């Protein structure tokens, strides 16, 4: 299936459209000019969007809540809009010629449907207009300072001002796309060439045109030899958090209204939606949102054996640098039996000195006293903790290596060697204690359904979770 491949292509085209001459005024400085003005060589490109009036923005479906979040009551903004985005899937779901669902379809953003006009359904990106999008480009001959072997690198820094994105409604639809030898309906057409999707029909809305409000951020793209550890690095603190307005997910938009007959047949499960007035994401117990994102394009895993270097990296990362490598962790683990015995002896000795009995018979408060103020226990406890930590790291590294080797030796994208063969997004959301999500005015059902209330998810810890986007 080519759907996700084409999704990436459409995303690239959208990005190119965003910087086209027709949409923006672009100002560039060459190396000589930049050196004269800043003391540094390189290229800077400022992208200044055209003006969009408040009236025009609201006519394209942007709510006053979102506009005011960018600049309260402002008559003008800077930005661009897109009429429609289509992602065609040439062969649908299943096996062509066998499964009824194996025919082309499309994901469509915008374009209008029913009472919603094409103008109201446009995708809109707006900013206050006080700052441009700035792109700084530098060419580096040695990315790690280790001489020419360090490798050349292109560094592209993109500074994004505070902005809002209002998506058009999201639909699924029929498509005229077709694989070679088949038609768009999934039936044989032996002489037929591949048909690239150009038209859609029978649109069904699945998600409302939600709005996303973001504060300033900076993204760094490195191509060639990546000194930052990944192709794209986007770390930011979004002042005021990340806000999504007007979320609505439809079960079956346009489904026939329920009747008394539906109660008899039991067909009462379509036609409603899950909706929320707003979704706000912030750091746990905070008002801003810390985000750390790394984006790479992965590849197939070629080696099926985990090396010592791999275990070294794992141990160092999981210990926060406290344990340098796998060998050090193994050495610490080797002292665990002796450290366990030494700690038990020290605790009993200090317990007898301080309280006249064994450690096991002490109250929790007395045990804490022994562990913190005893003559020999604190040192013994430190040694034991180090040994136990080493043992835990060794066990974790060995287990992770077993899983990794099994993945590398297995075919496929689900737990196999192609698991990361796509666009790999590593994202850390929130601060040290995670992120909070506030979902306001949640309602389940059609427009007659009452609001359920507000939902809070507190302290969500994602770690360095990965999302991999690939074709199938």
Image (tube, rainbow, N blue to C red):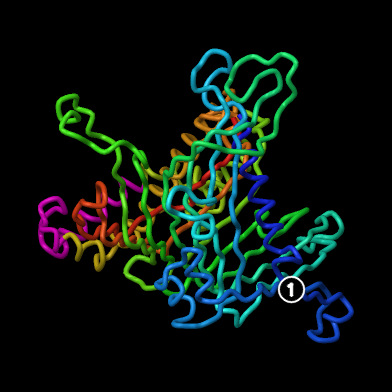
Q: Quadrant of the C terminus?
A: top right
Q: Position of residue 388 (x, y in %)?
A: 38, 47
Query: Does 157 appear above or below 39?
Result: above
Q: Position of residue 394 (x, y in %)?
A: 47, 41
Residue at the extreme bottom: 37
Query: Does 169 appear above or below 298?
Result: below
Q: Residue at x 72, y 56 (%)?
A: 226
Q: Position of residue 401 (x, y in %)?
A: 53, 34
Residue 352: within the magenta?
yes
Quick one: label 1, few (<14), some, or many (20+) residues within 10 Å? few
Query: Does 366 appear above or below 84?
Result: below
The secondary structure that dominates the magenta segment is: helix
Residue 306: within the magenta?
no
Q: Relative to residue 22, is residue 427 drawn left or right? A: left
Q: Relative to residue 417, is residue 447 drawn left or right? A: left
Q: Residue at x 30, y 40 (%)?
A: 271
Examine the rendering and report whether any part of residue 214 can be seen: yes
Q: Quadrant of the N terminus?
A: top right
User: SS for tag 1?
Assistant: strand
Q: Which residues are magenta?
A: 339-366
The quarter of the displayed image where residue 152 is located = bottom right
Q: Relative to residue 77, is residue 145 drawn left or right? A: right
Residue bearing mark 1: 25
The residue nearer to you, when weighing 202 against 359, is: 202
Examine the rendering and report whether any part of residue 322 can be seen: no
Q: Position of residue 122 (x, y in %)?
A: 54, 58
């Amino acid at each position: 299936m080519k759907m996700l491949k084409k999704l990436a292509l459409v995303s690239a085209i959208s990005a190119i459209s965003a910087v086209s001459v027709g949409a923006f005024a672009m100002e560039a400085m060459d190396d000589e000019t930049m050196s004269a003005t800043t003391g540094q060589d390189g290229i800077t490109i400022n992208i200044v969007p055209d003006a969009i009036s408040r009236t025009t923005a609201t006519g394209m479906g942007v709510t006053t809540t979102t506009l005011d979040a960018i600049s309260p009551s402002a008559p003008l903004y800077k930005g661009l809009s897109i009429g429609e985005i289509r992602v065609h899937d040439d062969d649908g779901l299943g096996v062509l010629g066998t499964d009824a669902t194996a025919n082309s379809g499309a994901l469509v953003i915008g374009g209008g449907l029913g009472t919603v006009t094409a103008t109201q359904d446009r995708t809109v990106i707006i900013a206050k207009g006080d700052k441009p999008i700035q792109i700084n480009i530098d060419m580096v001959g040695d990315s790690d300072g280790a001489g020419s072997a360090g490798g050349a690198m292109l560094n592209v820094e993109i500074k994004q001002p505070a902005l809002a994105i209002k998506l058009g409604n999201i639909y699924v639809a029929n498509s005229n796309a077709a694989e070679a030898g088949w038609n768009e309906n999934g039936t044989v057409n032996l002489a037929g060439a591949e048909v690239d999707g150009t038209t859609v029909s029978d649109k069904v809305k699945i998600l409302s045109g939600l709005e996303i409000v973001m504060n300033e951020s900076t993204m760094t793209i490195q191509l060639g030899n990546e000194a930052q550890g990944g192709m794209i690095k986007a770390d930011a603190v979004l002042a005021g958090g990340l806000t999504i307005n007007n979320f609505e997910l439809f079960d079956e938009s346009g489904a026939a209204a329920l009747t008394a007959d539906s109660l008899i047949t039991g067909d009462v499960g379509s036609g409603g939606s899950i909706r929320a007035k707003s979704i706000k994401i912030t750091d746990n117990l905070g008002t801003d949102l810390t985000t750390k994102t790394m984006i790479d394009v992965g590849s197939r895993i070629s080696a099926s054996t985990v090396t010592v270097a791999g275990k070294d990296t794992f141990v160092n990362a999981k210990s926060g640098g406290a344990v340098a490598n796998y060998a050090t962790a193994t050495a610490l683990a080797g002292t665990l039996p002796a450290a366990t015995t030494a700690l038990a002896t020290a605790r009993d000795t200090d317990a007898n000195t301080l309280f006249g009995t064994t450690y096991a018979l002490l109250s929790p408060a007395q045990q804490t006293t022994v562990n913190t103020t005893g003559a020999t226990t604190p040192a013994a406890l430190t040694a034991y903790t180090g040994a136990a930590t080493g043992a835990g790291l060794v066990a974790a590294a060995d287990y992770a290596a077993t899983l990794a080797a099994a993945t590398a030796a297995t075919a496929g994208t689900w737990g196999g060697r192609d698991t990361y063969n796509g666009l790999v997004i590593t994202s850390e959301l929130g601060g040290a204690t995670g992120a909070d999500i506030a979902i306001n005015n949640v309602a389940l059902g059609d427009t007659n359904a009452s609001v359920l209330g507000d939902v809070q998810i507190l302290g969500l810890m994602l770690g360095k979770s990965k999302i991999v986007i690939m074709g199938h």
